[in-house]
Amino acid sequence: MYRIAIVDDEAIVRKGMMNLVSWANLGCKVVCEAADGQDLLDVIDRVQPDIVITDIKMPVMNGIELIRKTREDFPDIVFIVLSGYGEYEYTSRAMELGVRHYILKPCDEAKIVEVIGKVTEELKVREEKKRKEVDMRTQVKRLAPRAREQMFRNVLLNREDIHKDFEAYLGGCGIFSKEVFLLAFHKETWFDYLEQFVVSNIITELLGSGHVLLVTSIRNDVLLLLDGRVFDEIQPVIVKVKKEYEKFDSSPLQTAVSSRGSWEQIH
């Protein structure tokens, strides 16, 4: 249910709205009533309303100040302004703050239901959009390692424009400014994905994730792009990898290590 806060300096208005409308039928629940903007600000972090229905003219803190202060920390709250005739200056200022929903006093049940219906529909659309964005980010995050692997493979096979697509994809990860080198593991049969994972995982544990920049496999080879700073440490690491890999697969591993150089020299 959407959480509602009602703010009005007239108790009869607050109680009337609370009792006049069947909030549950609208998918809502009134979680707070306040006599002015400051009263709501004092508890807003605790009650966490989704929708605030506020009078625009109140003592202590009016609706405009309430909207302005709330937007700083709770930008997703939707405001519905209660305004009377002759209060255009206030409503205009509320519009400048992004408020798009108004109820003219004196208000009746039908008008309240109509406006709440519009607001809840907007919130549903917003929630669905956020859900899709989260799903998309999750999918991109899940696919990113395979995409990096594929692009790295294409660079090694000289199929990728490394100055455009690849650099744009990797962004500010710093690979292009590092001195790097390649480490290759070869065996007589093709590396499957699990075997590639085992090799790269052992290397990562030994060197640290910050030094293993990219990993891919091409037929019978697993290739790792490593930070040039660990070049002098690589021989004992190779010995350790071969020993650990034998526990997983009896196929002998051969290795090759390139010299150190720039990203442009990889191919």
Image: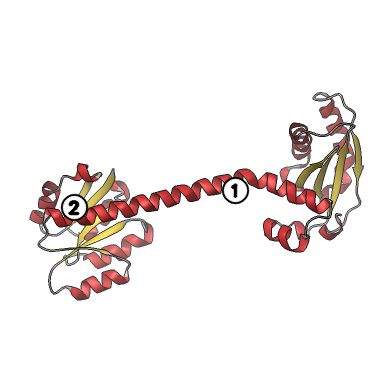
Per the image, the residue denoted by label 1 is: 140
For mark 1, give the secondary structure: helix
Per the image, the residue denoted by label 2 is: 113
Which of the pair 58/25 is nearer the observer? Answer: 25
Quarter of the rendering occupied by the N terminus: top left
Locate residue 66, reporting x and y percent. Answer: 27, 63
Please report the residue visible at 37 percent of the width from the left and 52 percent of the height from the top: 125
Locate residue 193, reporting x and y percent. Answer: 74, 35
Three-letter amino acid code at the position of disc 1: Val
Mark 1: few/some/many CA within 10 Å (<14, 14-19, 20+): few
In the displayed structure image, the side of residue 108 where residue 228 appears, left or right:
right
Please say whether residue 176 is visible from this viewpoint: yes
Sequence order check: which comes first, mark 1 or mark 2? 2
Three-letter amino acid code at the position of disc 2: Val
Please report the residue visible at 27 percent of the width from the left and 66 percent of the height from the top: 65
Which of the pair 96/114 is nearer the observer? Answer: 114
